[in-house]
Amino acid sequence: MRKLAVFNNISLDGYFTDRHGDMSWAHQGSDDPKFRAFVAGNAKGGGTLLFGRKTYMLMANYWPTPLAARNDPVVAERMNALPKVVFSRTMTKPTWRNTKLVKRGLVAQVRQMKAEQGPGMVILGSGSIVAQLTQAGLIDEFQLVLNPVILGAGRTLFDGLKQRPTLTLQAMRRFANGKVFLRYRLAR
């Protein structure tokens, strides 16, 4: 059975995007060498990346570019090489290599993918997908980078969640740039 994790940046007040859908605030403090090494090491992990349409478009417009290769060569190489699944009812054709488009049946499709043999899967961004899969009990682990920024408004990863899952803290790591990595497992 494949493991499904979420990896996301969140603000101190719990948002993963600001009120305009922007996530650029999460790049503040990225010049911290230990944090950069952590991000690069995390990117080397492999597996399948899962996205909703909005996050996919943001990522597809950046990672295949020369700017991404220059700024973050290790992360860019991995992001471009890894298999990707985008869940969207409106997208007609993915533009980023190694991408499979799934138009319907998010929960059933992810349940099927989890039952297969293979490396783990990671959801990046994609708040509505995170909320739906959390509600369905399909997410095994939440990996969150808590950023020292207050947005005041925006979107949480769990909008519309009807039941409160029980989480257990598995790891925590502080960085000099003020960011804190938190890893939680879903208690079963």
Image (tube, grey):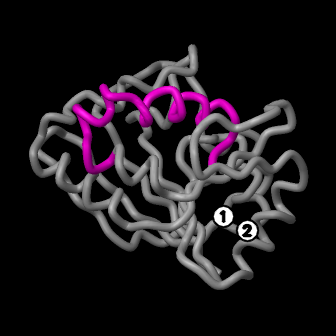
Which amino acid lies under the numbered mark 2 shown in the image of this protein?
Gly
Question: Does the residue at mark 2 contact the one at mark 1 (Cβ under 8 Å)?
Answer: yes
**Residue 69 lies within the magenta run:** yes
Viewer-nearest residue: 68 or 160? 68
Q: Is residue 185 left or right of residue 162?
A: left
Quarter in which the C terminus is drawn? bottom right
Q: Position of residue 81 (x, y in %)?
A: 46, 54
Question: What residue appears at the point 43 percent right and 66 percent down from the top-left corner?
Answer: 46
Question: What residue appears at the point 19 percent right and 32 percent down from the top-left corner?
Answer: 29
Q: Which span is picked out in magenta?
A: 51-75
Q: Which residue is mark 2?
A: 137
The rendered magenta stretch, by its main secondary structure, is classed as helix
Q: Is residue 150 above or below residue 12?
A: above
Question: What residue appears at the point 44 percent right and 29 percent down from the top-left corner?
Answer: 62
In three-dimensional space, the C-alpha distance between marks 2 and 1, rounded to whole angstroms, equals 8 Å
Q: Position of residue 26 (x, y in %)?
A: 35, 31
